[in-house]
Image: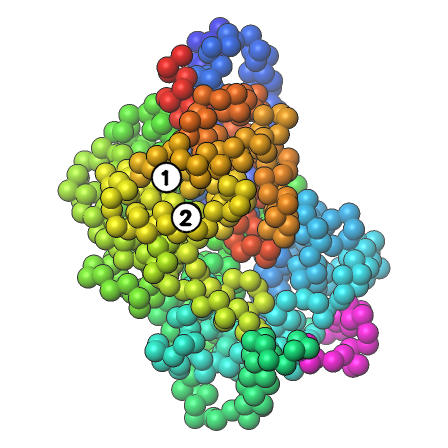
Amino acid sequence: MAKLLIDLIETVDSISHKIIKGKNGYYLPKITSDQLSFERHLQGFSGEVAPDCRLNISIKKSQSHLLSEQEVGKYWAGVLEGDVALTAEYLMLMHFLKRVDARKQEKASRYIIKKQEKDGGWSIYHEGFSDISISVKCYFSLKLAEHSDDKPYMQKARECILKLGGIMKCNTFTKIYLAIFGQFDWKGIPALPVEIILLPKFFYFNIYEMSYWSRCIVVPLGIIMAKRSKFQIGNKAVLDDLYVIPREKVSYRLKRDQNRLTIKNFFINFDTILRRYEKQPIYSLRKIAIEKAEKWMLERLEKSGGLGAIWPSMINSLMAMKCLGYKDGNPVVEKAIEDIENLAVYDDNDDTMFLQPCVSPVWDTPWAIMALLKSGLPNNHPALVKAGEWMLEKEVKSFGDWSMKNPVREPSGWYFQHANEFYPDNDDAAVVMMSLQLLDLPDKDRKSQAILRGFKWLMGMQCNDGGWGSFDKNNNKKILNNIPFADWNALLDPSTSDLTARVLDLMGKLGYDLNSHPAKKAIKFLKKEQEKNGSWFGRWGTNYVYGTWSVLTGLYSIKEEMTTDYVRKAASWLIDFQNDDGGWGETCKSYWDTSLSAIGRSTVSQTSWAVLGLLCTEERDSDAVKNGIEYLIKTQKEDGTWDEEEFTGTGFPKIFYLRYHMYRSYFPLLALSKYRNMVGSSK
């Protein structure tokens, strides 16, 4: 019976619900009746398989499905889903550019309405609470798309927004977009003079003391705010109904602390000075600043999928170009629009479309490779060899912003997207090198040289505190978070536990141990960052489950003694928060309320992380691990993957979350396979 089931599973490749990459964006095809009947046929066999075969069958099913998801025989790239605000901003952008496609607008509007919460607002993650900034954007985009105020969903949205405090409670970026459309007064926007581009690198504050994503957002915004053009939208999309008090009576003064001698008040006072300058700038200085900002932006548009290859900066750069007078048909403008359209995902099942914040092939591919290798594929398997050669092609070959503080002789590293040459990141570089060193590639010298260059680059990115950030070194001047326009909680890119642990994981796999000086510094950093309950904060995944898994894996790889008290404390913490169904889950609310850490409905990705972490400890043969494996086996679907609607990826804590559609494919396979290799094979 088991052999028959495996034979049936191997035919899943031809009917898997694979995402299709089209000319403009991605497509989720409709599920046919034949596919459903085949899955029901497979379902009929579940429960008839001998218990000792279930783990192997589950691994085989997952392996087959993951192989079928490889794109054009080279890489893996799952849909990367952000919140609904991206789709709302897309509609706003198309109206700003006067390039509205009625069919796309209808699909996007349908998606926005579909995502509306019961209270009328919109959330930043699955089944979350309504967020004022996103709700205002969604309401405004629907008005731009000529959805009438008296529609029930519009009435509910308006009521929710007013309960949340109205437009005045929105964050700065939302207010800037509304000001561009004439729906918010520019005098209510904190100062962001384009002249900051002129500040030299030795100044305490300059654009290179901001995170990569912040500077890519801020530089084009500086141009937009300097030009301050208002887009005429007519009366249908006016947002006067979203002000709690009449718009003409609104006070735009920033609230100061009662104690006058605070850092916050200092920056507010400085903001007041800058605003006065904004009213009467030095013309010659402003002209120079705009020209430099334009040049900076255009340079970073080359060899990239848009400025910074991430959503906010991509749309900001387009708006900035239009403010500078760039015409339709300009190759730079058309390329920028094409890059944005390529982020669209079309779902034929409900006739909707939504926008991804970016794409993640250089992140998904090495994780898929490592999961498939752990599952038993040989390291010279054709699919893996092609993926490995594709990753070698993605190595960074030129100097980017990171070189301001990392004086390596040869550039290297890997980025997250298909193209983002200026901005490789430590996390992607580490997992790419971990997967490359496992593969048997035809050109072994090319592989070894790439790993050598990449490792030297990565070691140069270690911060003074012993940790690693994402894209920059020593990007940690916390005082700058008090700047009034920096209310998106992500101005900086400091060292984090998850990234530091990932580098340790790579170091261990390359043969380094605790005697390495960088490893000693990193472990010291991790011990300092450990929470009192034994867990670690997760910067790029939700949340403490992600951070704790990352650290335990890194410590195990670098050959730390896994019976030490601080490691045992982390393992005990994971076990204590296992759900009754055997899985683990954690809500995004834990970023606001730490009492909710490791609390939430079980998900396959978070369960996989917990299992992978515990497998690195003396708890590897515990009932907790066995129950976690059982949860993964029993929740697996017939096509070899799992359901996961929850957002378990983190963009910016408290601001932006992500749902990696492939997390439900490669992380469970990695956990199941590692368990079989470490524990199951010894039974």
Residue for point 56% across, 88% down: 273
Q: Is residue 110 visible?
A: no
Query: Does residue 120 appear to the left or right of 203 in the view shown?
Result: right
Q: Are marks 2 and 1 in contact (CB under 8 Å)?
A: yes
Q: Nearer the viewer, residue 491 or 518?
A: 518
Which disc is residue 526 wearing? Answer: 2
Residue 640, how many percent across, how many down? 50, 25
Q: Amino acid at mark 2?
A: Leu
Is 646 left or right of 534, judged from the image as shown?
Answer: right
Q: Which residue is the extreme one toward the left?
A: 445
Q: Position of residue 4 (x, y in %)?
A: 46, 9
Q: Nearer the viewer, residue 397 or 538?
A: 538
Amino acid carrying label 1: it is Leu
Q: Which residue is mark 1?
A: 555
Quarter the C terminus occupies:
top left
Q: Earlier in the sequence, mark 2 or mark 1?
A: 2
Residue 511 lies in quadrant: top left
- Image mark count: 2
Q: Position of residue 22 (x, y in %)?
A: 47, 45
Q: How many angstroms separate mark 2 from mark 1 (CA)?
A: 10 Å
245 is within the stretch colored magenta: yes
Q: Is residue 389 above or below residue 162?
A: above
Residue 146 picture quarter: bottom right
